[in-house]
Image (spheres, rainbow, N blue to C red):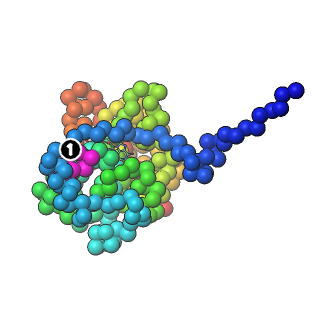
C-alpha cells in the first residue's frame, strides 16, 4: 500500500492570513505612460504640499487641511480636470483625489497650481487600499466616482470597482447624510451600480424616481462624458445618501 503523501500546500485563505499570498483583482491596469516634463516637475515641486502617502496611514483632515471644512473624496480622477474645477468652485470644501495613473497625478497637480487651488490633496495609490488604511469612518461629506473603467466584457466584470462590498465600504466612510455620487456612460454598468445600491443597507436614493438623477450642476463635464456623448451614449448619474 502506498503511503498517502502529506499535503504540504496551504489553502489560499491560510496563506492570505499569514500574509504570504494576496489575492487581488484590481480595477485598473497600470499604464506606465510617459510623464511629460511638466507633469514630472509638478510632482517633484509640489508633492510635499499636495501629496498624501499611503504609508502614512490614517489621515486627520483637520491636520492635513488645517481647517474643519467638509471633505469630498474623488476616486479615479483621471487627468484631474473636473476635480480641479470643483475644488476651485468650492474653496470652503476640502477635496481629496485618488488616482493610480501617474501622468494623471502630474496633470492634476499642474492644473491645481495653475488655478491657485489650495483645498486639494492627492493620493497616488489604489483607492481600495486608501479606503482601508487612510480614511477614517464617518468622515466624508461626499464620495465621487465619475466614469470608472467599465470593463465591458462579461469575463472582466469582476474588475469593476463597484461591488456590494465596495458600496458598503463607502457607506462606512461617509458621514450620516453624506452622498455617494457615481456617473457612468455605460448602461450595463449603470444598471449594476443601481442594483448594488438598491440592495445595500443604509442608503436612501436621492432620485425622485428611485433610479437615476439629472447631472447636478456641481459636476463638470469630463473628457469621458464628452466622448460618450459623441458616440451617442447616455450618461447615468446616481446619488445615494447615507441613512442615520
Ligand atoms: C475611465 S477613467 C475616468 C477618469 C475621470 N474620472 C474622468 O471622468 O475623466 C477611470 C480612472 O480611474 C482610475 N482607477 C481605476 N481603478 C482605480 C483604483 N482602484 N484606484 C485609483 N484609481 C483608479 C484609472 O487609472 C483611470 O484614470
Q: Residue at x 56, y 51 (%)?
A: 19
Between 114 and 213, the one nearer to me in the picture: 114
| Residue 165 visible from this viewpoint | yes
Residue 14: percent from left, percent from top: 64, 47
Q: Say if the magenta span includes residue 91.
A: no
Residue 28: percent from left, percent from top: 37, 39
Q: Residue at x 34, y 49 (%)?
A: 75
The N terminus - image quarter: top right
In the image, the residue with mark 1 has its CB under 8 Å from the nearest atom of ligand 1 = no
Where residue 58 sits, quadrant-wise, is bottom left
Q: Locate ligand 1 by image quadrant.
A: top left
Above or below 68: residue 212: above
Q: Say if the magenta span includes residue 103.
A: yes
| Residue 89 visible from this viewpoint | no
Above or below 144: residue 155: above
Residue receiving disc 1: 35
Q: Count the marks: how many?
A: 1
Residue 160: percent from left, percent from top: 42, 38
The residue most toward the right is 1
Residues rendered magenta in the picture: 102-110
Amino acid at each position: 500500500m502506498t503511503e498517502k503523501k502529506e499535503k504540504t500546500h496551504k489553502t489560499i485563505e491560510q496563506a492570505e492570513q499569514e500574509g504570504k499570498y494576496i489575492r487581488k483583482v484590481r480595477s485598473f491596469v497600470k499604464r506606465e505612460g510617459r510623464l511629460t516634463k511638466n507633469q514630472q516637475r509638478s510632482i517633484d515641486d509640489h508633492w510635499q504640499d499636495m501629496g498624501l502617502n499611503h504609508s502614512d496611514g490614517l489621515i486627520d483632515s483637520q491636520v492635513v487641511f488645517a481647517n474643519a471644512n467638509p471633505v469630498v473624496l474623488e476616486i479615479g480622477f483621471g487627468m484631474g480636470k473636473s476635480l480641479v474645477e470643483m475644488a476651485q468652485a468650492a474653496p470652503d470644501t476640502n477635496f481629496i483625489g485618488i488616482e493610480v495613473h501617474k501622468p494623471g497625478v502630474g496633470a492634476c497637480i499642474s492644473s491645481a497650481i495653475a488655478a491657485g487651488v489650495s483645498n486639494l490633496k492627492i493620493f497616488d495609490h489604489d483607492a481600495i487600499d486608501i479606503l482601508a488604511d487612510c480614511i477614517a469612518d464617518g468622515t466624508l461629506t461626499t464620495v465621487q466616482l465619475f466614469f470608472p473603467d467599465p470593463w465591458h466584457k462579461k469575463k472582466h466584470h469582476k474588475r469593476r470597482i463597484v461591488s456590494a462590498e465596495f458600496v458598503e465600504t463607502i457607506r462606512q466612510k461617509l458621514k450620516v447624510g453624506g452622498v455617494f455620487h457615481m456617473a457612468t456612460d455605460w448602461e450595463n454598468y449603470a444598471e449594476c451600480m443601481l442594483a448594488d445600491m438598491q440592495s445595500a443597507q443604509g442608503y436612501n436614493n436621492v432620485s425622485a424616481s428611485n433610479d437615476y438623477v439629472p447631472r447636478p450642476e456641481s459636476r463638470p463635464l469630463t473628457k469621458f462624458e464628452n466622448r460618450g456623448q459623441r458616440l451617442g451614449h447616455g450618461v447615468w448619474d446616481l446619488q445615494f445618501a447615507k441613512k442615520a
